[in-house]
Amino acid sequence: MNKKTWLITRSQITAGDVERAILPFDPEQILNDEIVQLRGTVRLRIENARGMADVITDPASRRFFRALHKRWPWSAFFLRIKPIHANSAAEEIVDLSVFMSFLWVHVDELTYVETAHSVVLNYDAHQFHGHFVELQTRAAQLAAAVGMSPALINERAALISRALTTFFEVGQQLDQKPAPPGGE
């Protein structure tokens, strides 16, 4: 099976239709061989979402993705994510931003402010980290359940951790103010 693009529609979000949304990627509905082939290949897109803010600041989207996680907690196993840098391809940044949205919809106290020059995101780091650990754990559990080797499980865990780290590193790089002319 090749890489898949999974579209979550606005109507599914509005209706809270998690069951129909996950059918193509539900481990209870597909064979173990297919699950293994889908590891890290699924591109998730959200209809009419122009960016992360459209997901994490929209109450209907937050409810939908929280319910989706409850029913389908394996996003870290399936979703196509990789470490990024400031000049990464737009689709790679979108992939990682979608994954990051899966984390931030679970943070209760979240402030997101976007300006022409930067994005400021304030959140409960402990709550964020707890959910990240859960995503890592669920990815490893699914990988073990379908017979993947410990080496492959550890490889995926390291990739997910590095992708998360680079997301914050790139954000800090982009937020740094250039030095004024003359070095002062």
Image (cartoon, rainbow, N blue to C red):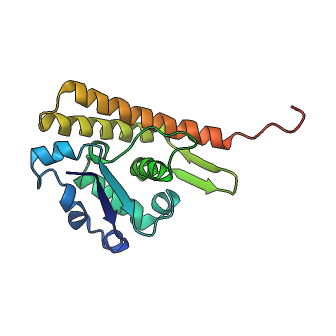
Q: Which residue is more in the foreground, 147 or 56? A: 147
Q: Which residue is more in the foreground, 11 or 182? A: 182
Point out the residue furthest to the top here.
151
Instruction: Count the labels in the image.
Output: 0
Of the 4 image quadrants, the one containing the C terminus is: top right
Expressed as whole percent of the image width and height from the top left, the position of residue 49 reads: 46, 65
Residue at image point 86% right, 31% down: 183
Q: Which residue is more in the foreground, 73 or 78? A: 78
The image quarter containing residue 32 is: top left
Up-down relation of residue 8 to residue 135 (above or below): below
Up-down relation of residue 164 to residue 103 (above or below): above
Up-down relation of residue 16 to residue 66 (above or below): below
Q: Judge from the rendering whether residue 136 lies leftward or rightward of residue 128; answer left or right.
A: left
Expressed as whole percent of the image width and height from the top left, the position of residue 28 reads: 11, 52
Residue at image point 19% right, 36% down: 143
Point out the residue furthest to the front here.
2
Expressed as whole percent of the image width and height from the top left, the position of residue 15 reads: 31, 73
Expressed as whole percent of the image width and height from the top left, the position of residue 93 reads: 48, 49
Residue at image point 29% right, 57% down: 68
